[in-house]
Amino acid sequence: MTWKMKEIVLAVVLSVICGVIYLGWSTLWIPISAVIGPVGAGFMFGIWVIASPIVAYIIRKPGAAFVAEVTAAAVELFTGSHFGLAALLVGIFQGIGSETAFAIFRYKRYNLFTLMLSGALAAVFGMIYNLLAKGFGYYSTEVLLTTLGIHIISGMILGGWLAKVVVDTLAKTGVLEQYAIMKEKRKKEDANGHVSGL
Amino acid sequence: MDMFLGCNDLSVRYYNRSEHILKNITLSINKGEKVLILGPSGGGKSTLISTLAGIIPEYIEAEVTGQVFLRDNVGIMFQDPDSQFCMLHVDEEIAFSLENRSVPQTEMDNIISDLMNQVGLKVDKKTPIDTLSGGMKQRLALACLLALEPEVLFFDEPTAQLDPAGRKEILEILHRLSQKTNQTMIFVEHMLDGCIEWMDRIIMLNEDGNVIGDGEPEDIIHHFTNEMKEAGIWRPKLYPSKWIEVIENPSHPLSIKLSKQFKSKCQTAMKDYKIENPVISTENVTIGYGRKSIVKEINLTIDKGEWISIVGENGSGKSTLLKSLIRLEPIKKGNIFIHGKELTNWSDRELYEQVGFVFQNPEHQFIADTVFEEIAFGGSQRNWPEELIYAKTKRLIQEFGLEDHENKHPFTLSFGQKRRLSVATMLLFDQALLLLDEPTFGQDEKTTYKLMKQLKERQKQGTTIIMVTHDMDLVDQYSDRVLLLNKGKMAYQGTPFGLFSNRDILQKTKIIPPLHYQLMHERREEILV
Amino acid sequence: MKVNHSFLATINPSCKLFSHVLVMLLLMVITDVKVTFLIWFLAVLIGLFLGGWTISYLLKRLCPFFGIFILIFWMMAAFGKGQETIWQWAWFHVTQESINHGLTIAFRMLAFVTYGLLFTSTTDLTVFIMSLIHQCKLSPKWAYGLLAGIRLIPLFQSELNQLKMAHKVRGYKEKNGWKMFLSYAVPMFTQGIRKSERIAIAMEARGLSRAKNRTYYRTTKVALKDGGYLVSILAIVIVMIIIFR
């Protein structure tokens, strides 16, 4: 499955927009996390992994989820965010997590379940990075597990579910007609139309 | 059949639509011909040139039937200056075209310099593309196309997103190029001034995607006046008359018409105005960030029910000034008063019930899922009773001609409808003051005048209107007063008549007045000579 | 990413990225405060002597990160594991161990940031992407697609500001996080999708996919000094680890 240029640029542009929004989200996050600690701030985690499910849901190709998260993370690098190269590393971990969700189903299922799974796995892989780099292992086990739990839930809702809401809204505005998501929908409708026609 | 470029019984349909966008089109375009394709928006003009350029169905998927005769080497220029580049600097961007043609690296530098000269792009090679003006970006886009050494050049509304100065610039370069190289050129445009004069042929499409006219420009203009008007095409103000004839022959029909227009303007200019009930006034306002000032020392007073236009070159601070009037830009020095109360003393909620602001991009303002909810938004937020919301919203929907689209998602509307919706959303509270940032930018003739008519109605009911625009005809026709900004400073404040008849200011600020003023200036010069 | 004229700016970007990422990976396995501090300090020295940084530039760029440094330290110190309690209040629990861990992690993050800054302040974006083509065998389609998207970052940032203004004027305030996201994301994505489609078509129309044996205006190579940079930076870090362990 080769990528068309249209799909490449779309994936990059959508990820870049996510990256720009992430930056805005970061400024919200810092003051909150200082007061309620890593656990509470975790509720906002999901937004940071939304690029993957959005792009994968539209383009439906192997690699889409991974590329999206890494590119979105790279925006933080290019604009000189607080996290520099570190953001790129996080992006790689989360991207692998998201990608896994779609790979498990051999890139054949793109529905609410796989999108939420992608958010959840991004949370899990993000936590692996946190353990390795940010010393999350030093927190007590309860804190660690609660944080992970909250990240997973947040990833499923703010990552997976919200991604579906966003893309479905976009589909309604008619801008996605040239991409896999609408093509598959049309194919299905055609098939159904054919069956009912018989 | 041996054809240079064209199609035979061509029909095109996008997969998401049941109807064809182009139907049974047969065309043959000769080498060296300059062809202009006209038609209503959404009527398949772009589809036609994209098909002839080989983009459909190769890169945009669609069902294409019939024969198409393509050239191998073509270039196509699009309307949005910001979305045809992929590199950061001028030289790299031109090089991208050369790389695709496998030109050896050692030759690239010379070719790039040559091309930059050819299109009059007089900047450093390493200039970041972001810092170029819209007109300069389109010059660069042209250089990138010429780097492909194309046999045919296609232009898909290349000036639709430029201001009049940028537009003039680009069309002049293209005209010169066409004379020098006899390049085959195919245009889609919705504004005819500046290009129709040198076209060989016009192809006219209708709404259903059929060719209804194909011939010499003069004939087509003559025969299809109504169709063009209906399609919202900005018809030429001069063509097919020649300027020199209009000046020299006072009995030329256009000459008579312009003289009449000028005289009636003279009369209106005699009325002097008195400010009785100021809605907004500023005292020595300077706007900017940090040490930089974008707009300096502005003093103005605007009366209730006035229509004010703000004009000036790109980057002169027009939008900044407009935004500062409702606290969207930081004021460094001076004061702004609305209804006599200092701007800083207004709460957000009160302020925006008094002042509406229409952004340049209507989509930025949309927050609801349907047109109805979009207009009703402010009312439901203020817990108005259902009946009141319903009545007010319905009235606005009707006023702005959106009855058939009430339940549509705002993003799915046409460009003209989006603009009208964005104005309607700002009138739910019957705001006393309406600020508009280039409301007619990129709009066609029909939607422009429709909007102007609706604004005029509002003005009659007492709404004060302040609008930033580049369109001097609108300034002349609609505004009571005009503010001219030049490099952040107020260069003129007064009637449009006063501005357009002042040759010194016009020349200094590069403003091109409407034709009847131009005629007046020419005549005056003649008398002097 | 804006480039200066230092020695570091002449190092091949892919090679530089690889070196810095390697150091960062090493940092992940180092749990000693002193060594972590030294590796961070190495980055500062490189910046000052090879990266063309001035002291004032360094302070200006790193100052905002010290806030984060304190934050990370505080989170780790107040919420981390440990036995030797120093201070306790409400849900905060500070211990000897947690302070130690807090310092390590805070210096590690500071080092991440500094190595990142070392990269961004000395690397030209176009050259970086070109070196991804030449050294990392990234396909030109992806490389140019990436650049096309990156050049839109400022545009989208100003778009986001416009949206904020427009929401203000309309009196739209959303406490609900996901609705707020939606109100920004939908207009930006719609605009972005349209733009991306036009850009892709413009690039194709200029012959991107038809190119056979494409030539390059700018090429990047790996020279001896690039390898030298990689080897020396790694050697210094490893020596530090061995000596101070």
Image: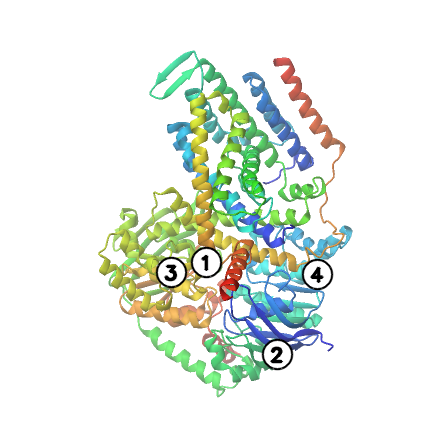
**Residue A93 occupies which quadrant of the picture?**
top right
Circle 4 marks a residue in which chain?
Answer: B
- Closer to the observer: label 3 or label 1? 1
Residue type for callout 2: Arg
- Closer to the observer: label 1 or label 2? 1
Of helix, strand and loop, which one carries label 2?
strand
Q: Would you say the residues marked 4 and 1 are in contact, meaning their CB atoms lie under 8 Å apart?
A: no
User: Where does the image place residue C103, in percent across and percent down from the top left?
Assistant: 49, 20
| Nearer to me, A190 or B283 | A190
Nearest to N terminus: mark 2 or mark 4:
4
Q: Residues within 10 Å of mark 4 (few under 14, many from 20)?
A: many
Of helix, strand and loop, which one carries label 4?
loop
The residue carrying mark 4 is B148
User: Where does the image place residue B13, in percent across and percent down from the top left?
Assistant: 56, 68
The residue carrying mark 1 is A173
Nearest to N terminus: mark 4 or mark 3:
4
Residue type for callout 3: Ser
Q: Is residue B497 visible?
A: no
A117 relative position to A41: left or right: right
Q: Would you say the residues marked 3 and 1 are in contact, meaning their CB atoms lie under 8 Å apart?
A: no
Of helix, strand and loop, which one carries label 1?
loop
Residue type for callout 1: Thr
A96 relative position to B457: left or right: right
User: Where does the image place residue C233, in percent across and percent down from the top left?
Assistant: 67, 25
Q: Is residue A116 visible?
A: yes
The CA span between labels 4 and 3 is 41 Å
Nearest to N terminus: mark 3 or mark 2:
2
The residue carrying mark 2 is B201
B232 relative position to C170: left or right: right
**Residue A69 occupies which quadrant of the picture?**
top right
The CA span between labels 2 and 4 is 25 Å
